[in-house]
Image: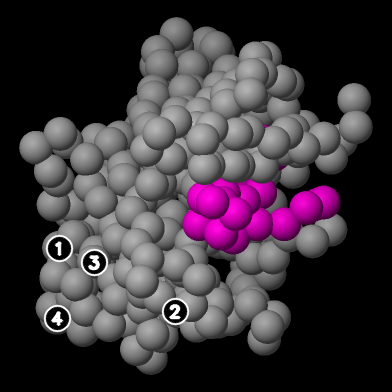
Amino acid sequence: MNDDQEIILRHGAWEAVVAVHGASLRGVTKGGQPVATGYRGIANKQGGQGDVLIPFPGRVGGGTYSWDGVRYQLPQTDKDGPNAIHGFVRTVDWTVAEQSESHARFTLAFTGAPGYPFLLDLELIYTLGDEGLRCDFGITNTGAVAAPVATGFHPYFTVGSEQVDTDRLTLPFDSVLEMVQFIPTGKIFSVAEAGLDFRHSAPIGTTIFNHCFLAPQRGSDGRARVTLTGNGKSVTVWMDEAFDYVVLYTGENMPAEYRRGSLAIEPMTCGSDAFNHPEWGLRRLEPGARFAGSWGVG
């Protein structure tokens, strides 16, 4: 199989590009206009665009953590510091288990990695419908011992503005983790204390985002919604109850031509460095158990 096989999904005005490599999301358009910024071909990815982040999103400080009394060392894969970052599955090929015009299901039998000796069966489903893109994930522990698991996604969104500075953001999350050099200190602040209160629509302006938010305000359907508005358009990212955290990133560490050109809105089932702060949403998945959730954009 071509290790950079891409699949184009279509439904009505919606189109999405997904790929075997990393089960990645390589772009979403509506009526030919970008909704999630994209790329074609592995070499053209910037800033983790569309990556699937399993078994941990964000960073693990120093790449070290303890689990059931054992200390583990993960590869220090973070270009910005001696940390592990974004899990293990974004650089491997998944299997296309099902495919139709508007639907693709990927699977992966994950057999562990250095510092993470746990066995998982992974499933990821992309579906286009009238309301936009839906993404479902499932993680099953196929090993003999409990495993620490979490999931995140790394899409970037746009309403077509040249810079997100001119856009408005609605971010209904009450709290934010304090970070030092991208690693949480353990302190949690209200968004008002942190000067990052976008719970009601407000202009992004010069705000620099590279933060992990928590304590979502959910609708009656249980979903939390983050909305980007500007240029006469609006994009809403929704997350079900599996996702209690979201990272926003304005791309300051990306090449100059990409900085602040779109906004990463990253659904996460745990906070950054949750392997060292399991109270921040880390799941203890017992043998045979399954953890699943959904997010989408429309």
Q: Give the image location of residue 174, x and y in percent.
A: 15, 63
Q: What type is the residue that disc 2 sits on?
A: Val
Q: Give the image location of residue 246, x and y in percent.
A: 35, 55
Q: What type is the residue that disc 4 sits on?
A: Glu
**First in sequence: mark 2 or mark 1?**
2
Residue 289 lies in what quarter of the image? top left
Q: What type is the residue that disc 1 sits on?
A: Asp
Residue appearing at x 69%, y 36% in the figure: 8
Residues at marks 2 and 4 touching, judged by CB atoms closer than 8 Å: no
Helix, strand or loop at mark 1: strand
Cα separation between marks 2 and 4: 23 Å
**First in sequence: mark 2 or mark 4?**
2
Q: In the image, which residues are magenta? A: 22-42
Asked if residue 35 is among those painted magenta in the image, a careful observer would answer yes
Q: Nearer the viewer, residue 154 or 27?
A: 27
Residue 240 lies in what quarter of the image? top left
Identify the disc placed on residue 164: 2
Cα separation between marks 3 and 1: 12 Å
Identify the disc placed on residue 174: 1
Cα separation between marks 4 and 1: 10 Å
Please identify the quadrant where the N terminus is shown.
top right
Helix, strand or loop at mark 4: loop
Helix, strand or loop at mark 2: helix
